[in-house]
Image (cartoon, rainbow, N blue to C red):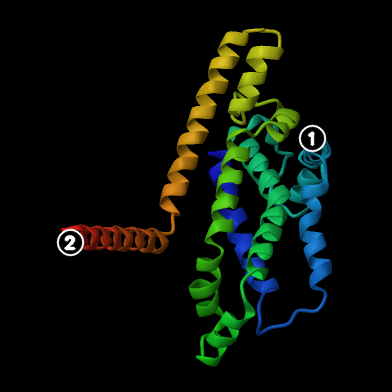
Amino acid sequence: MIWIMNFIPQITIALLLTAWFTSHTNEIKGKGFFKVVFYMPNIITAATVAILFHSLFNYPVGPVNDLLKSSGLVDEPYYFFTSKLASKLIVVFIQFWTWYGNTMIVLISGVLGISPDIYEAAEIDGANGVQTFFRITIPNIKTVLLYTLVTSLVGGLNMFDIPFLFLKGGPDRATLTTSVFIYNQAFSGSYLYNRASAASMLMWIIIAALSGVLFFIMRDKEQIKMDKEIKKAKKEARRAAKGGVNQWQW
């Protein structure tokens, strides 16, 4: 749930920023500066981010509580860390804020690999920016999108550092991920290595199965169809050649 809730806005914002930075119609000044700013959260270590957000949402004194009180939204400080929903949403936001810049850079690198001649032809044909993005850019970066989906899936299902460092999986296991559960079983006083190993193997099976589903969904149907036609043509050519040889021998 945490991965899905952070990945949907992450890929959406990354695609919008990619379309903005790679637009051939609207030239933006200072693109490099904005790319660095958006990518910066990914450079900060997880421990630093966890401490930062723990301080921001601290109770009873913290910047977020001070802002809520000064704006009149709440009368008393709100204890975010005892709310399951609030804690989960904070972890979701941290994951989104940390990784959307990295996703954006990966998508931009994929777009830059597309031949400019295709965009020039689309512009001559009268295609607008939206049509160009959905009809040219997205189909041509399908491989990069698949890479982003699979790596994000693997990273999301193995999420450990932020949930563990932020609230150690609490409150009431609201932010307890599989990796935190495995760590608690093996190294947090329980020393149940057999259970941790079993959970790790189950997690590997789930990741492999879901990755296979993603590969199947995002397969290039046109390329597969073309490959089948080529194989069929080769078989027919071999049969024809074999028939010609048999006829010559007869």
The reply to whether residue 79 is visible in this rendering is no
Please name the residue shown 56% across and 71% down the image: 137
Please name the residue shown 62% across and 8% down the image: 192
Q: Find numbered disc 1 in the image and state the secondary structure of the residue it sits on.
A: loop
Q: Nearer the viewer, residue 152 or 119?
A: 119
- The reply to whether the C-beta atoms of the residues labelled 1 and 2 are less than 8 Å apart is no
Please name the residue shown 76% across and 44% down the image: 65
Q: Nearer the viewer, residue 54 or 213?
A: 213
Task: Give the CA distance from mark 1 to mark 2.
Answer: 94 Å
> Does 206 sit left or right of 17 as displayed?
left
Q: In the rendering, at what x and y percent does residue 88 appear?
A: 61, 37
In this view, the mark in front (1 or 2): 2
Residue at numbered disc 1 = 60
Please name the residue shown 55% across and 74% down the image: 133
Q: Nearer the viewer, residue 162 or 218?
A: 218
Q: Quadrant of residue 79?
A: top right
Q: How many numbered circles does the render carry?
A: 2
Is residue 223 placed above or below 81 in the rendered structure?
below
Q: Earlier in the sequence, mark 1 or mark 2?
A: 1
Q: In the rendering, at what x and y percent does residue 230 appear?
A: 36, 62
Residue at numbered disc 2 = 247
Is residue 20 placed above or below 105 in the rendered structure?
below
Is residue 84 placed above or below 22 in the rendered structure?
above
**Number of the label disc, if any, that sits on residue 178:** none
Q: In the rendering, at what x and y percent does residue 56 appear?
A: 80, 42
Q: Quadrant of residue 213?
A: top left
Kind of residue indicated by mark 1: Pro
Q: Find numbered disc 2 in the image and state the secondary structure of the residue it sits on.
A: helix
